[in-house]
Image (tube, rainbow, N blue to C red):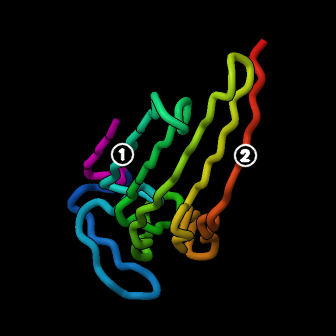
Amino acid sequence: MASFSAFKAKSILGPAAATFIQPYTNTIISGSIPVNNISEKSWSFIGLYRFTEGPLNKLNLSLGANTLGKRAITDNGNQVWFGYVPGRTILNLNATYRYDAHWTFGLNIDNLLNKKYIYSVRSVNVIVPGPDINAKFSVEYTF
């Protein structure tokens, strides 16, 4: 399974032919500025393998990757543009094992390669780092 998106996320505030002088950098932008914290390009992919025989019978493994392209940092009114947050790609791993008709065990490992990245940006003063590698174990019982 996979998905992909590409679009131009630009502010609709202000005329498209407007000129904006940006603080801190004193750069000049003509036209609309990017929308805060929105990636113009993203994709995701997940691959699943089900073992159906042998000692690993009933085990499912999946590996997923997702990417966000660079994202703009603006004042939340999208009238002042400060620059871009770099894009990122992270990998996630999932394993489930169906022990019998009632019990299923699972393990999710998010950010498998422990990539350092910026999760979200609200302004130049509020930048949220992405979570480090983290694992979750689950046990499910079905009646």
Q: Give the vertical position of 90 relative to 125 (above or below).
A: above
Would residue 11 be counted in the magenta stretch?
yes
Mark 2–mark 1 distance (CA, rounded to whole Å):
22 Å
Quadrant in which the N terminus appears:
top left
Quadrant in which the C terminus appears:
top right
- Stretch in magenta: 1-12
The tag on residue 137 is 2
Amino acid type indicated by mark 2: Phe
For marks 2 and 1, give the one nearer the viewer.
2
Q: Give the vertical position of 35 relative to 27 (above or below).
A: above
* Along the viewing direction, whichever of 96 and 122 lies nearer the viewer: 96
**To which residue does mark 1 refer?**
45
Q: Is residue 69 left or right of residue 133?
A: left
Q: Which residue appears at 32% of the width and 55% of the height? A: 40
Q: Is residue 125 left or right of residue 35?
A: right
Instruction: Say few, some or many: other residues with alpha carbon within 10 Å of mark 2 (under 14 / 14 to 19 / 20 or more).
Output: few
Q: Position of residue 12 (x, y in %)?
A: 34, 49
Q: Position of residue 55 (x, y in %)?
A: 54, 38
Place residue 67 in its image quadrant: bottom left
